Amino acid sequence: MDLAKYKIEKSDQVFYVPNFLTVDEEQYLIRKIQESPRQNWKELANRRLQLWGGQLTAKNILMAQPLPSFVTTYPDIIPRLQSTGVFKSSAHEAPNHIIMNEYLPGQGIMPHQDGPAYHPVVATVSLGSHTVFHYYQYKTADDNLETSVNANGRIIDTIPALSVLLEPRSVVITTGDFYKSYLHGIQEITEDNFIGGDGVSAPMIAGLNVEIANWKTLAGSEAKKVVLDGGALERRVRYSLTCRDVENVANLKTLLTRR
């Protein structure tokens, strides 16, 4: 895959690939997720999730387990991500861990960073529904703090630095400084409203006054029309596959020997 042609105009470190999966592949993955045993799910306050590839310890070491065959063989998500080249400098040259989040309409996630356990690349595959993915920056004491919030003792600018519409079956890949220094999050809303552009200037997100950075590369006819002309997109159930490479993996043979 020639990833360069999927680079978002406003950043050379974020890439948006529409139709990364086919409709049949998406439906197959959603079915496999929905057929998962209840014990595979971890319930959080505002969503539920599954961990594929193992669990992280408090010291950011992966207690590895095999990834499900439906991400390694059919559909071959891991080999496809590997073919982009973004993981070529990571410890395993491919993702070895996936967090699968389920987002119901109205659910989202606060601005956050993924932390040091992972190689600084993350690929997020969307299934079932669109969402708007926002990147945020920390503010300094010299900045105007009127529109900021406090998180973990640091101030976050509530106006996104970059916003990307994630269509079903797409993947967004975040690298470099956008992984290391920026935060990302999803608003807890049931629909996204847009102010259409004029074909030259970018469409905007209503209420935030920020552009949809990937408006030129949207592939879905319905979503693209709403974004370009202005209007609302109602959110449905979305499954997010967050694919990363955990660099430190436990040596199970060593652990058994120590016991």
Image: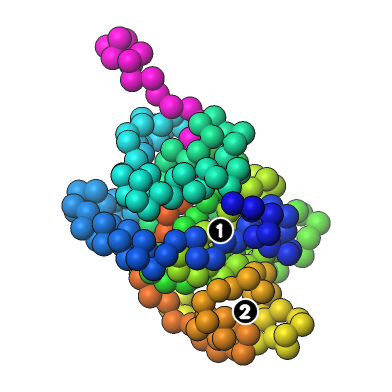
Residue under the point 74% across and 63% down: 10
Tell me if 166 is positioned left or right of 44 in this view.
right
Residue 66: give x, y in percent of width and height: 32, 36
Q: In this orientation, does residue 154 appear?
A: no
In the rendered image of this protein, does residue 148 appear above or below residue 77?
below
Q: Residue furthest top?
A: 257
Please report whichever mark, 2 or 1, sits nearer to the chain's N-terminal start.
1
Magenta-tinted stretch: 244-259
Which amino acid, mark 2? Answer: Ile
Q: Which mark is residue 159?
A: none
Would you identify the image quadrant in which residue 161 lies?
bottom right
Residue 89: give x, y in percent of width and height: 61, 34
Residue toward you, 82 or 157? 82
Counting other residues with Cα less than 10 Å from the Cα at mark 2, is it few (<14), some (14-19), or many (20 or more)? many
Would you identify the image quadrant in which residue 33 lies?
bottom left
Residue under the point 63% across and 71% down: 217
Q: Which mark is residue 172?
A: 1
| Cα–Cα span, label 2 and label 1 | 19 Å
Residue under the point 71% across and 79% down: 202
Q: In this orientation, does residue 21 appear?
A: yes
- The residue singled out by tag 2 in the image is 205
Q: What SS does tag 2 mark?
A: strand
In the image, residue 11 lies in the stretch drawn in magenta: no
Residue under the point 55% across and 45% down: 83
Which amino acid, mark 1? Answer: Val
Q: Residue furthest right?
A: 142
In the image, residue 258 lies in the stretch drawn in magenta: yes
Quarter of the image that includes the C terminus: top left
